[in-house]
Amino acid sequence: MNLLLQWEILFAAAGGVMVGLVMGAVPGLSDIIAICLMVPFTFYLNPVAGIAMIMGLSKGANFGGAIPAILFNIPGTPQAAITAFDGYPLSKQGKAGKALKTALYASCIADGLSDCVLFFFAAPVAMAAIMIGPTEHAAVVIFALTLISITSVSGPIIGICSTLLGLLLSCIGADPLTGAPRLAFGSAELSAGVNIVPMALGFFVVSEIIWQRCMDRRNGLSQKAIYTAQQQKDEDHSFTFAEFKQCAPAIARGTLIGSAIGALPGIGTTVGSYLTYVATKRASKHPEKFGEGALEGIAAAEAGNNACNGPNLIPLITLGIPGNLAAALILGAFTMQGLTPGPMFMEQQAPLLYAIFIVLFFSNFFTLGFGALFTKVMRKMVSVPKNYIYAAVLIFALIGTYIVNNNTFDLFFTFGFSILGVLCRKGGIPMIPLLIAYILGPSLELKIRQTMDLYANDVTIFFTKPISCTFLLLSLIITVYIIYRRSFNVKSEN
Amino acid sequence: MTRYQISGSMIAVLGLSVFFLAPYQVESFESSVFPRIISICLVLFGILVILAPAKGEKQNTVKLFDPMLSAYFILVLTTIVLIRFSGFYPSILLSMPCCLILFGQKDYKKIILFTLITTGMVYLFIDVILGSRLP
């Protein structure tokens, strides 16, 4: 308790949440950039305060990214892209306030519950985590990618194509095992691979701006018409208890799925968000409303996304393996303080760790408070003519691309991915499976090749190990079932 | 052809290209296995997309060349080239007005005012508050 009752810790957590909210809400300044820029400040704080600040940044940015996703269909962070599926249509109906409140409450509740998961289950999960080797990890990634591909709105086959495209793009750069350049065409910049930030900014932000402008022109909407339409909406920013009860199952689902995904290193919050969305849509009595402004869709996406925050620390604390960027920087913060996360860490530093867990839980109240104030301010942005917002966001996206590596060449990657983003929209290729496959591709290839090296290229090891076999069989069963159901539905309609 | 069939064709062609290019762009055989497997799968699924009936998809002529789309991309590319050669601030001062005019804004006073405000905000937020110097 002595560790907790220090103003430094509370200020660090509150400051982290505030900065994270702002950075996450500006497309181009994502949570990754926020964390990278603020980490030097954490080195002057005590371990609990430093980690509270980094986790506050991550929590704030995770919710902050949903704000432009809902208001403008431009996600502030890659994981907020799923929130836009229902958030933006609801915002266009004049219910931006309702959508933002749904996202805020779902985020805070799921995040808080997942912090409880971290508090109570870190130790037993650590025991189970030791059983997961490269074979099991590869099988889990294949399962996640299969699920994401075949549940795509455009259809399972085009979804699988999108996933394969993402895996192919992830091959560009360095071989994950040997580090040798691959598919770089002799370019030194391509040899290092493409960072996720320029890719996501080009794919989701720049291409979205260009696409929206083209759609407005194609639909013959004049600037005056667009501006008038923006002003005439009656704002419905209430979020009733009945609506909360409607969203509660989605939030619970998101907490469970997000916590499970967060506890696995390298899977990422975007997967948690998408899987929760898909699961909630399937369980809903009105799945046809998803994509049209369903509150459960927003709640599911945000809950799945934010519930990954706390459990992301489990592989770091228990095995010393950071599961994402925030965890990697926390590892740096621990190391600077002379602490070494790993299997003995929980035993040796239990008071410190549980103090961190409690601060994480209370940070959600900061997110709730600051988030409520911030969304009130951001809602006013809807009244600003969209073209000014687009132009400013475009500039910030280019700035954000540069800041990651201080390299102006990355701007060309953003440009290239913006062309790819527009081509995907024109060609009906879903973008989320591509993004997730791009993130998971290097990890998948590394684990498969490690398995092959460990077991003398024996492919059957994937089916002889029980956990691995279970996930691969599940992937196959779900794929066959979904394709059969879709074919049956097509035949019934014919 | 529907848009899915065009997408499927392009995916299959991409897969074939990577399959034949991979050995020349990769130093070792082990490094080329994963990209080649992915490219084979792309070819197979690209063909499946061409052959499979897409639900609700009508015969559609996809407009591959759109002048306005090209204009937007040229604007972004020009901005990036300007940033490479002259830095962020001159580029923002030049490209922001062009961007707003291309987006259909006609009030030149508001355009100039917005450009100056955005440039100031970028300097304040990025250089002063975050301490990250832009070229």
Image (cartoon, rainbow, N blue to C red):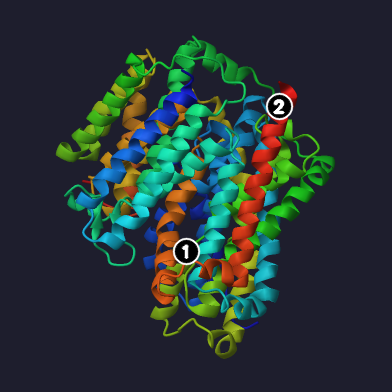
Q: Residues within 10 Å of mark 1 (few under 14, many from 20)?
A: many
Q: In the image, are marks 1 and 2 on the same chain?
A: yes
Question: In this rendering, does residue A337 appear at all?
Answer: yes
Type of residue at label 2?
Lys
Q: Quadrant of residue B8?
A: top left
Q: Is residue B109 above or below residue A105?
A: above
Q: Is residue A164 above or below residue A286?
A: below
Quadrant containing the C terminus of chain A is top right
Q: Residue A206 versus residue A36: which sits nearer the camera?
A: A206
Q: Looking at the rendered structure, which numbered label has been put on residue A491?
A: 2
Residue B48 falls left or right of residue A84 = left
Q: Secondary structure at mark 2?
A: helix
- Chain at tag 2: A
Q: Position of residue A131 (x, y in %)?
A: 58, 78
Q: Position of residue A435 (x, y in %)?
A: 46, 46
Q: Is residue A126 above or below residue A413?
A: below
Tell me which label, 1 or 2, sits earlier in the chain: 1
The residue lying at 32 percent from left, 53 percent from top is A404
Question: In this rendering, does residue A366 appear at all?
Answer: no
Residue B70 falls left or right of residue A313 = left
Quadrant containing the N terminus of chain A is bottom right
The residue furthest right is A242
- Chain at tag 1: A
Measured Cα–Cα span from mark 1 to mark 2: 48 Å
Q: Secondary structure at mark 1?
A: helix
Q: Residues within 10 Å of mark 2 (few under 14, many from 20)?
A: few
Residue A320 falls left or right of residue B36 = right
Q: Residue A380 versus residue A445: which sits nearer the camera?
A: A445
Q: Looking at the rendered structure, which numbered label has been put on residue A326?
A: 1
Type of residue at label 1?
Ala
The residue lying at 59 percent from left, 89 percent from top is A347
